Amino acid sequence: MSLSELQWPLLQAVEALADAPLTQIADRLREAMSPAMGSSALVIFTEDCTGRPQKKAGDEEIISRVSIAELDTVRGTLPDNGPWFGEAELAGRIRPVLALKHPSSRALLVLTDPRPVDPGNDAGMDLVAYLWRITARRIQEKVADAPPSYLLESRAASAERVRVTAELTDLHSTTLETLLAALRSSSMDNAVARTTVTDLTAKALVGLRTLSDRTTDLVKEPVATAFERLREDLRPLTSFSGIEVEFIKPPLKGRDLPGEVAHAARAIVRGLVLVMMEQNDVSRIRTQWDCDGENLLINVRDDGGGSLAVDAPSIGRLDRRVQALTGRLQIDVMPGWGSDVFVTLPLDPPSQPAGDVEGWNLAARELEVLQHLAAGQRNRTIAVTLGISENTVKFHVRNLFKKLDVGSRTEAIALAHSHGLR
């Protein structure tokens, strides 16, 4: 197979990747790679997407069970450049894999059971690496732009992951602590067995809590770290613009920011700085972050003549990002004194009044299933989380479609989001 034979399909594949939302990018990438490389499943792991660090396509048995800890282990063994063929534990067992790491973002691509279409031709592997570079950069750009759709999806996924992780941690911690108490009881006469099982159980408990902390870290970012990343993002711009940009650091002990809030804050400040730099009479811009425990408070001010157009399309786009997180953007333009922009981003999603969905007449289980749908979960994952069969989930989904008067999961999710279900 030569690249010339793939030329037109390749262009179509690149177009599909460029247009793909993050929720579909794994499926699009797997389809694009199929002329050169088959696989049972494709998994992308990127910590830039704090709300949904895994993007998966393929065999449900694999993608529903693969864990962040497994992917992190694979990533730690990879060289910075070039593909890696080998065996790794994924979804609970050792599998043949092809893995690639993107150097700048450290995003990871894993293909399980890789099957080169033409094993003797390097062009196929070159195509896989090329499409992966495009995809990794696309993810970086999407997260950096932080459009409202990404922020809503990220917030929903973050909240759901924290909730599920907390429930699993409580469940297993209680089980293991009860087991420890029983095994330590003096009424048990096999001292050797008691000591051995106690040690193993204690290690399992530590491991479980470590995984819980790891998952929580992926959806949160210290406010000082988030602000320093903003400075790094703006460093090239400020180095060559001739405009001084001053950064007032937030308190070091401020509350950690949810990932989607940190991403949005950086995107909003970058956008405001660019808009302010377009004015002819600006020589200095000051940006400051603070945190009151419930909100991230952002202030960006220029020393221009107060000519910032508050109704400009660029300001409108920034305001929509703020509104996606139920925040507020206020602009004070002072002729002769500059422009002052204040942004407030809540750190927690708003509570949802129950009355907003009462008209749907949903049973308690149907509402639970809808909430999981709104968080982007598949039927199999919902079944495992709720302790019911996948067929039962499908039954509830069909009932939801009838009661909500929708024809697809996408419509149901959009309707749920419009009523505040995340």
Image (cartoon, helix red, strand yellow):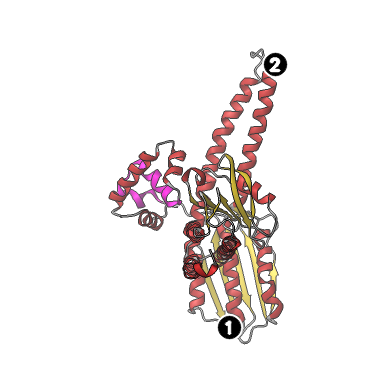
Q: Secondary structure at mark 1?
A: loop
Give the image location of residue 373, x and y in percent: 41, 49
Residue named by callout 2: 191
Q: Which residue is located at x 61 percent, y 72 percent?
A: 300
Farthest front residue?
120
Rendering quarter of residue 197? top right
Rendering quarter of residue 129? bottom right
Q: Secondary structure at mark 2?
A: helix
Question: Count the marks: how many?
Answer: 2
Residue in front for this viewpoint, 344 or 208? 208
Give the image location of residue 412, x and y in percent: 36, 54
Dot 1, crowdedness within 10 Å: few (<14), some or many (≥20)? many
**Residue type pointed to by label 1:** Gly
Residue in front for this viewpoint, 192 or 146? 192
Q: Earlier in the sequence, mark 1 or mark 2?
A: 2
- Label ID, residue 306: 1
Give the image location of residue 125, x and y in percent: 59, 60
Would you say residue 363 sits in the magenta stretch? yes
Give the image location of residue 306, x and y in percent: 58, 83
Residue in front for this viewpoint, 316 or 12? 12
**From what the image shows, is residue 163 above or below residue 147?**
above
**Residue type pointed to by label 2:** Ala
Q: Which residue is located at x 61 percent, y 53 percent?
A: 99
The CA span between labels 1 and 2 is 79 Å
**Stretch of the chain drawn in magenta:** 353-376
Q: Is 325 on the left or on the right of 354, as rendered?
A: right
Q: Is residue 127 visible?
A: yes
